[in-house]
């Protein structure tokens, strides 16, 4: 008898939609899923705004791209386009990631009339809006990116529980190098920091009022400079708190050891330039994609024990967890890694293997394909 596992499966026809696709965490996960499905032989079409920042990267991978002009949600341009694409390509699954795309995608699936299933992924911790709480689970399958998000949705959404799923995302692990690259050395040199500096970095937006914990990061840094002159502290991102952060660097007398740099398209170089990633989130956090990116570079991580963050790695094996807003605990965790270079290496190497085994782009696509298959067979 033939083993069912050896029988090749017909490619699933998927329309991935994203009305932003500008490079945030949600956009990166949308891109990685499309790339993983495409690389795994599924028939993927990506629909994104014309001229968006990530469109060229998708085309470079050979993923078919259909663009549209962003307009008013009430004009329904995206819904009409997506419904047309569903019919033209006999799409089986339409998958949306951005909140503003949930209902246009669901309506497009209904309008197409070919049995297309709508899937939406929830990348955020806050509870959905009232209309979505009442109807989202009745009209689509909903994916939570972490157990923490799943718990919120389980309490809030009304509808059949079989339509609520929890699936972890993934990244392109091979895009990240473990050894220091020439580009990473140049990045550090441009900051004027010596080769033997131990660089801690926070990567994320610093939007008011609290950002991603950058203020706490600088306060913790000020507790370490006297004992560890080799330590350096880097904030990478953008947001309206930049002037506040620069003022704090001056007030804490960190001008020679702390710096702020903008986001770069080549996040792999930025991660490679660090010696440890600090993710001291203070508000809500669904998971923390930057943790996997740092771990893929074999960098140890220090993060807040908050929402879905502890699900990204195993404490003590790949990094350290600290209470959110606890500056003293954050400084102690950084102190531990400064005192123990061998521990930085151990945590980093184990983290790289953990991400490769569990959170690669291919693993992400495989988990999602399993869900798609079940929905198509339902």
Image (cartoon, rainbow, N blue to C red):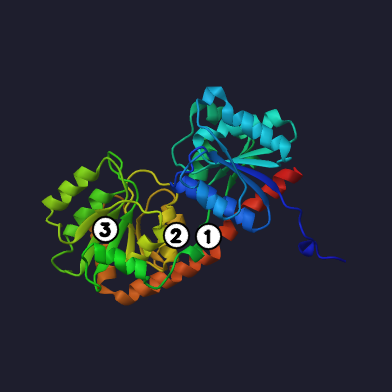
Q: Is residue 364 left or right of residue 224?
A: right
The foreground one among 75 and 138 is 75
In the rendered view, would you say 327 is above or below 335? above
* Dot placed on the residue nearer the N-terminal end, 2 or 3: 3
* Percent x, y of residue 282: 32, 46
| Number of the label disc, if any, that sits on residue 292 | 2
Residue labelled with disc 3: 234
Q: Are marks 2 and 1 in contact (CB under 8 Å)?
A: yes
* Percent x, y of residue 206: 30, 45
Q: Is residue 327 visible?
A: no
- Secondary structure beneath dot 3 equals strand
* Dot placed on the residue nearer the N-terminal end, 3 or 1: 3
Q: Residue at x 57, y 25 (%)?
A: 76
Residue at far top of view: 74
User: Where is residue 295, by image quadrant?
Assistant: bottom left
Q: Residue at x 30, y 75 (%)?
A: 341
The foreground one among 268 and 303 is 268
| Number of the label disc, if any, that sits on residue 359 | 1
In the rendered view, would you say 180 is above or below 51? below
Q: Residue at x 41, y 61 (%)?
A: 268
Q: CA distance from mark 2 to mark 3?
A: 18 Å
């Amino acid at each position: 008898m033939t083993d069912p596992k050896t029988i090749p499966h017909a490619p699933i026809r998927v329309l991935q939609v994203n009305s932003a696709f500008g490079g945030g965490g949600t956009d990166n996960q949308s891109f990685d899923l499309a790339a993983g499905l495409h690389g795994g032989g599924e028939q993927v079409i990506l629909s994104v705004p014309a001229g968006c920042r990530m469109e060229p990267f998708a085309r470079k991978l050979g993923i078919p791209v259909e663009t549209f002009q962003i307009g008013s949600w009430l004009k329904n341009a995206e819904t009409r386009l997506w419904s047309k694409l569903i019919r033209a390509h006999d799409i089986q699954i339409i998958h949306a990631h951005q909140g503003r795309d949930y209902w246009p995608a669901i309506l497009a699936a209904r309008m197409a009339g070919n049995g297309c299933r709508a899937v939406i992924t929830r990348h955020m911790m806050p509870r959905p809006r009232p209309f979505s709480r009442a109807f989202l689970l009745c009209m689509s399958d909903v994916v939570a990116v972490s157990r923490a998000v799943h718990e919120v949705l389980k309490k809030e959404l009304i509808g059949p529980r079989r339509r609520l799923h929890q699936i972890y995302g993934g990244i392109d692990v091979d895009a990240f190098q473990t050894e220091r690259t020439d580009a990473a050395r140049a990045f550090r040199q441009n900051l004027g920091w010596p080769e033997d500096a131990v660089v801690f970095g926070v990567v994320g937006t610093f939007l008011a009022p609290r950002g991603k914990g950058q203020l706490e990061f600088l306060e913790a840094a000020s507790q370490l400079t006297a004992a560890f002159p080799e330590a350096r502290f880097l904030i990478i991102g953008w947001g309206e708190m930049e002037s506040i952060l620069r003022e704090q660097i001056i007030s804490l007398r960190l001008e020679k050891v702390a710096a702020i740099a903008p986001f770069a398209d080549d996040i792999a170089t930025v991660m490679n330039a660090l010696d440890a990633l600090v993710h001291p989130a203070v508000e809500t956090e669904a998971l923390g994609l930057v943790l996997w990116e740092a771990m893929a570079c074999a960098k140890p991580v220090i993060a807040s024990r908050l929402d879905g963050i502890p699900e990204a790695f195993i404490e003590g094996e790949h990094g350290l967890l600290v209470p959110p807003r606890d500056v003293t605990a954050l400084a102690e965790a950084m102190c531990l890694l400064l005192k123990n270079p061998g521990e930085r290496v151990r945590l980093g190497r184990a983290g790289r293997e953990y991400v490769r085994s569990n959170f690669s782009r291919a693993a992400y696509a495989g988990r999602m394909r399993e869900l798609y298959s079940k929905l198509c067979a339902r």
